[in-house]
Image (spheres, rainbow, N blue to C red):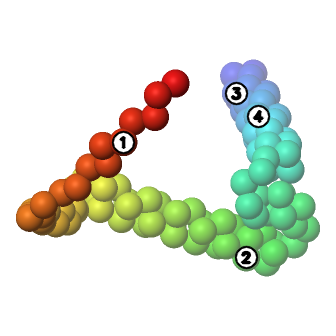
Amino acid sequence: MKRKRTELQGRKQNRTMEKEKDAMSHIFSSYASRTTMHGMGTLAAAQSLKAKLFWSCVCAGSMGMFVFMLSRLVIQYLSYPFNVKVEEVRFVSIYFNAHLIPS
């Protein structure tokens, strides 16, 4: 009797976990098909495991490159690189136009 209960509980838990897994899969595929993130739509639309693996690698690679470039830009920004060249120019005489036009 006790064994049957645990088997039933185990089956219920398995069904619940499968439903949750299906729900998460549906949420991901729904998000991926609607997002503008490059490559995610093709990842969601891929039918074979090879295609999904390929598009996963492409998405992960592009995300890695984005993070790499962003980190380099942030490091460059925080290092405050600047070049300022100040020159003093002396004029011997400066002529001003002294003509006024009356209104």
Disc 4 or 2, which lies upstream in sequence?
4
| Label 1 sits on residue | 99
Q: Where residue 82 sits in the image (x, y, percent)?
A: 21, 62
Instruction: Quote the CA–CA distance across marks 2 and 3.
Output: 42 Å
Query: Which circle, 4 or 3, is nearer the viewer?
Result: 4
Q: Which mark is residue 54?
A: 2
- Residue at position x 46%, y 34% in the image: 101
Query: Which circle, 1 or 3, is nearer the viewer?
Result: 1
| Label 3 sits on residue | 6
- Residue at position x 76%, y 34% in the image: 20
Instruction: Quote the CA–CA distance across marks 1 and 4.
Output: 87 Å
| Label 4 sits on residue | 20
Q: Quadrant of residue 37?
A: bottom right
- Residue at position x 69%, y 22% in the image: 2
Q: Say if 45 sits above or below 32 in the image.
A: below
- Camera-side residue of 50 and 87: 87
Residue 83 visible from this viewpoint: yes
Disc 1 or 2, which lies upstream in sequence?
2
Disc 1 or 4, which lies upstream in sequence?
4
Q: Where residue 103 sits in the image (x, y, percent)?
A: 52, 24
